[in-house]
Image: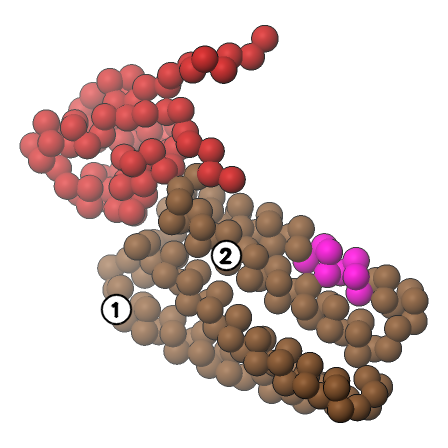
Amino acid sequence: MAFQEKSSIVMTAILAVVYGVYFTVVGQRMSGAPVDEIVYQPLLIVAVVPLVILAAASHIVLALTNLKEANDHDERDRWISLRGERVGGYVLAVGVFAGLVLAMAEAPYFFVAHALLAGWVLAELSSGGTRILLYRRGV
Amino acid sequence: MAKPTEVTNRIRALRFAAGEITQGELAERVGVTRQTINAIELGKYSPSLEVAFRIAQALGRPLEAVFEYSDGPSSKG
């Protein structure tokens, strides 16, 4: 497995877990209180901490166990990365558009923020998933 | 999503013919990863023209002895 492929799998998994937990916790809070009163900001900021730690730690381990290949980034890696970014870009655009519509409709900040956040998370998951698929199945 | 490439190649056979060069050795000579050479051999990735030339050169053969493009039944116009 190419180093960049391993890296993609790890990062996509970390994002899925961290934001899966975040959205689950926030979702639970939604059933308890009116949306305007949910204090999600600290949770959102705090979620970045395990994200960064897990990402850094996992990549250190990956690099140490794949010393020779750790800096590899050849044309196939670049090409797959570009394809992934393109898919992610479409998904991100949908999220941004959703946030825009919600803002124009003067929906609560809570929904605007989470439309944008969900758009970004789904975009990263989509681009990661696309990369993994392309590495496995070929282009 | 994954359209199989119509470019086929004889890299594997030529590797063995040229003194049993491994995928890793070929990758190093060409400047790509071993996994990319493997993907090319299996038809899972179509290399750029430059990389195709470098592979041919590393195997000591002309380009069209290594790669073949089949114009299938689906010809346009």
Amino acid under label 2? Gly
Given the current orientation, which residue lies at the most extreme front position? A31
Could you tell whether A67 is left or right of A35 in the image?
left
Amino acid under label 1? Thr
**Of B22 and A131, which appears nearest the observer?**
A131
Which residue does the image show at 46% across and 81% down from the upper left?
A: A53
Residue beneath label 1, please? A65
Q: Could you classify mark 2 by the number of other residues whose Cα lies within 10 Å: few (under 14), some (14-19), or many (20 or more)? A: some
Could you tell whether A41 is left or right of A4 in the image?
right
- In the rendered structure, which segment of residues is drawn in magenta? A92-99
**Of A48 and A131, which appears nearest the observer?**
A131
Residue beneath label 2, please? A129
User: Quick check: can you spot residue B62?
Assistant: no
Disc 1 from disc 2: Cα separation? 23 Å
**Of A130 and A51, which appears nearest the observer?**
A130
Given the current orientation, which residue lies at the most extreme top position? B77
Shade of chain A as shown in the rendered figure:
brown
Q: Position of residue B44 (x, y in %)?
A: 36, 38
